[in-house]
Amino acid sequence: MDDHPTRRSVVLGTLAACASAASAAAADDDDPRKEKRPQKGDLLVFAEGDREGQTITLADIKLGEPPVHAWPKDAVNAIVRDGSRLNEVLIVRLDPDELDDDTRPRAAEGIVAYSAICSHAGCPVTAWIKASEGNDDVFKCMCHNSEYDPRRGAQVVFGPAPRRLAALPLVIKDGALVIAAPFIGKVGAQQG
Amino acid sequence: MTITSTTIKQWLLSSTVAFTCVAASAAVAGPIENYSPVTSARLENPEPGNWMLYRRTYDGQGYSPLDQINTTNVKNLVPAWTFATGVIEGHEAPPLVNNGVMFITTPMGQVIALNAKTGDQYWRYKRELPEDLFQLHPTNRGVGLWQDKLYLATTDDHLVALDAKTGKVLWDKKVQDYKKGQYLTLMPLIVDGKVMVGGSGGEFGVRGYVVAYDAEDGKELWRTFTIPGEGEPGHETWSGDDWKSGGGSAWMTGTYDRDTKTVYWGVGNAAPWPGGLHPGDNLYTSSVIALDPATGKIKTHFQYHQNDSWDWDEVDAPMLVDLQRDGRSFKSLIHPGRDAIFWVLERTPERINYVSGWNFVHTDVWKGIEPETGRPIVDPAHKPTLGKRVDFCPSLWGGKDWPSAAYSQKTRFVYVPANENFCGGFTGEKLPLVPGQLWLGTKAEDIGLTVRPGADHFGELQAWDPASGKKVWSHNFPKSQLFGSVTATAGDLVLVGGTNDRMFRAFHAKTGELLWEQKTNSGIMGMPVAYEVDGTQYIAVQSGWGVDAQRIQDALSKGNTGLEDNVPQGGVVWVFAVKK
C-alpha cells in the first residue's frame, strides 16, 4: 500500500465515503419525500397523541393552550414527512396583537409555527413554560434550558442557543393549516 | 496584487472540494516523529512523567508521583503556554501525555495532538457529526491510547481509531444508533489490546452495556448488558419488560485490577426515574460490576442503592486502594457516591464485600445502612413516586457527580469534589417511551434544584481518611458549586477547578490551605494532570464550561442566590510551570 496517497486519491476516497453514507441513509427510508423539509402547500398533522396523523385545522389550535407537535404532510401524495426529526414543527396560537412585525405576516389567525429542533445542541424543544426572565410563556428546550419567544420570531430569550428557531409561515385553506413557504432560517443545531 | 479570474476560479474549486465532505479533515502541521508505542507494560506501570489513562493509572487514583512542583514553590506557578480549542461546551477530558506528546479531546468529536512542551499543534481531527444529531451531553472525556493508535468514542455513537502520529482514521465502527438516544462521551478503557466503551442514554430508556473491540481491526469481541436478560442472574430483580428500557448506562471509564484481571465498571441510574415505574432492585443499575476483560463475563457486583429513583448514576468507577482499616490490610474499592454515601468496599477475586459507608454530604434519603449487606435503608418520604411531588437531598446531581475524586499515596487521604446543601424534587408520571426522546418519568420542566435554608456554601472540597472514616479538612465555596475532577500529586498538592469564578486552584494536601489560584478563560470541568518533559514538570487542565456545571448554574441563577448565569464558554488548554 502506498503510504503517501496523492491528494486526488484522498479526495476521491473521501467523496466515495460521502456518497456511500448518503446512499446508505436513503436506503433506510422507503421514500425520500418523507425526509424532505416542509414544502409550500403541505398540510400539518398531529405528531403524537390520540389524533396522531390527522390533519390539523384552525379549530384544533386554541388560544391559551400549549404548543402542538406536528409533521408536515405532502397533501397531494399523502406522505407525512416524518423521515427526519428536523421536520418536526411546533404550533401555538397567540394573540395577534402580541406578534412583532416579522412574525405577524407568517402567522395565520395568530397561529405560528416553528422548527421543534433547538439551535444549540439539536435537542427537541418540548416545554411551554413561563420565561426565566419575564412573565410570558415561551418555548423551552429542557436539555440545556434555552428559551425562545414565539411572539418575536422565536428569538432566544434565555440559555445557550446561538440563534432563533426556524420559522414556518402558515395560511388557512378550507379550515386547515397549510404551509405558506419553506422554513425561514436554519434548522438544527450548531456544529463545532 | 491582481486577482485574475483564473485564480478566483481555482480558489472556488478548491473550496468546493474542501467543503464537500469534511469527515476526517485534519489540518496537518506534520506527523509526530518518534512516537512511543503504548503497551500493556507501560499502561500497567506508567512512567512518572506521563498521563496515558483517564486517571493516570489503572487503579483510578488520579495521583501523580511528580513532586518538582510542590507546596513550597506552587506559588510561583505561571502559564507556560495556552491553546484555544475553538470549541464551546464542556471540556471534560484530561490532557493526556505520552513522552512529550499531548492529546486533547473536545466536545463535537475533535482530537488535537500538541507538543506538550511548546503547545505547537501536530494535527487536529474533526468528526463530522450528523445534522440531525441531538446532544444532551455535548462533551468528551478523552481518547484511549494503545500502541500507535488512539480511540475516540463519539456522541453519534461510533468508536473511531486514529493513527496517533497523523490523526488519520484507521477504522470507524457504529456502536449503537444515535437516533434512539444512544451516545458515547467517555474515554475508552484499553486492556491487553481490547478497547472497552460503555453507552450513555439513561434518560432515553436504553438498556446499558459495556462492549469491547479488538484494538487492531475494530472487531467486536463481546458485549455485556448492564441489565441482565431473560435467564441471566439478576433478571429476577426486574418486573415484566421493564428491563428492556431500564437504563443502566455505563458512560464513564472503568478501573482495572491487573493482579486479578478484573475491570470495575460503574453503572448508571434506572429508567425512567421514579422507582414505582420499575419495581424491584433493578440490577445492575447504580452498581459497580466486576468484568473479565477477556470475555465480558460479570464476575460479581455491588449495588450501591436499590430501585434507583433519584437519577443517581453511580458511573464513576471505584478507586482501587490498598487500605489498612480496623486492624487489617485489604484491597479496597472506594467510591464517594452520587447517592451521598462514601463507600468503602473490599474486593476479592470472587466477591465485593461491604466494609463501611457514611454520608459525606447532607441527605434525607437514607435512614442508615444494613451493616451485614451494605444495603442503604430508604426513607420513603424522600423517594420519588408517581402522582406526588417528592423532594430529596442531595439533588439529582448527588453528593458527587461524575467528576473524579483522587487518592494521594502520600497522605492516604481521598479528595472529593462534593456539593453540599443542594436538594431536588419532581413529580413522577407515567409517560410513553418514544425512541430518541427524553424519557424521565416526570416532566422535565418539573425538575427542581433548591438550596437548603441557611446554607452558607455549595461546593465543598473534602479530604477524607478512608481508614478512619473521618473528614480531615474541607474547603467551602460560598457562591459556587464544585463540578470538576480532582488530582493529587506527590508534591502534596490537590488540584481542582470546578467553580463558577473560573478559578484553577492548588490546595495543600495535608492541611487544605489554598496555596495558589489562577483565573482562567472559562469555568473548569476537566481533569487536571501533572506531567514532565525534558526534566521540567508541568500542570495542565482544560478550561471550558458547559453541560451539567452550566445546568446547575442556570438553576442557581433563578433562585435567590444572587448568582448570575454568566460563566463564559470556550475551551482553552492551560499548561503551567514554575517560573524560573
Image: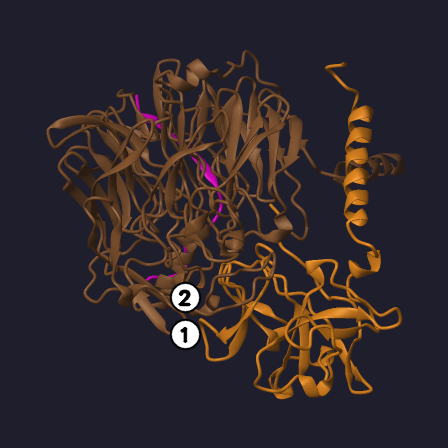
Chain colours: A orange, B brown
Mark 1 = which residue? B387
The type of residue carrying mark 2 is Ile
**Secondary structure state at the residue bearing disc 2:** loop
- Residue under the image location 26 percent in, 34 percent down: B494
Label 2 Cα neighbours within 10 Å, binned few <14 / some 14-19 / many ≥20: some
Q: Which mark, residue B447?
A: 2
- Residue under the image location 29 percent in, 21 percent down: B65
Q: Is residue A120 visible to the viewer in this orientation of the structure?
A: yes
State if disc 2 and disc 1 touch (CB < 8 Å).
no
Residue B124, how many percent across, how many down? 60, 31
The type of residue carrying mark 1 is Gly
Residues in magenta? B563-580
Magenta span includes B567: yes
Residue B164, how many percent across, how many down? 57, 22
- Residue under the image location 59 percent in, 68 percent down: A155
* Label whose residue precedes the other's in the sequence (1 or 2): 1
